[in-house]
Image: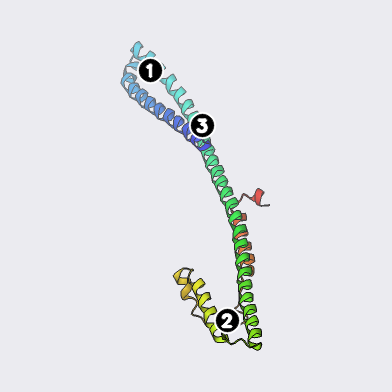
Amino acid sequence: MTDIEKAELTLGNLENIRKHLIQEQAELANERGRVALGAHTGDKKSRSRLDEINVAAAKFASEFTSIEAAIIEANKNLDAAQAAEAQAADRTKAERIAALNAKLKEELDDADDALADAISSVLSARALLMEMHALGVTSPTDQMFRINSVAVIKTVIQLLPQPWINDFEFARLSPLQKKNFKDLANAWGMTIENQIVARLPKEEAA
């Protein structure tokens, strides 16, 4: 049984006791109305019963006050249990986000390196072809190499989701518009780390 379930059970039991006390008080009030007239007009039996009812009513007032105080405390305990569970859930989420954030940075770093390596390899291959042309090789031509290389790159690009493929219809980027995955990973990593800190209790985030 969780702390919240225990707190809810305790609160439910106290509320049942309060409900029972209210019912008893209503029954005493009804009976007091029935015996009060006789008690105040000389009927000894009614007087005795009225005295018992008055004692019970006084006891009820004290007991009801105690139950109300207990219910207030039980509600505080339930709130505390719910807050603790919410903090634990946030802590678990924060830990998972931290792990995912580290993996995200790793994947984007790898993507950055892989793209740079791929372009470098294509250009190196072209340089080798140009050297062979100088030595007399005539095929494949530079144009054939370019056309087929672009076709291969487009084939790989088509593995991306369709909306991303559409975005490849773009004008050349200016130097200020150019980006790389490593810079993005570092910037996004800081933003995500700030969100992790916001989920943790202040004493853990310090």
Rendered residue at 38%/17% (across/down): 50
Q: Residues within 10 Å of mark 3 (few under 14, many from 20)?
A: some
Q: Which residue position is annotated with label 2?
A: 173
Of circles 3 and 2, the one toward us is 2
- Residue type at mark 2: give it: Leu
First in sequence: mark 2 vs mark 1 = 1
Q: Which mark is residue 70?
A: 3
- Residue type at mark 3: give it: Ala
Q: Quadrant of residue 146?
A: bottom right
First in sequence: mark 1 vs mark 3 = 1
Rendered residue at 66%/49% (across/down): 204
Q: CA distance from mark 1 to mark 3?
A: 30 Å
Q: Is residue 78 above or below residue 47?
A: below
Determine the residue located farthest toward the front in the rendered image.
136
Q: Which residue position is annotated with label 1?
A: 50
Q: Residues within 10 Å of mark 1 (few under 14, many from 20)?
A: many
Rendered residue at 57%/85% (across/down): 139
Q: Where does residue 149 sit, x and y in percent of width and height?
A: 55, 78
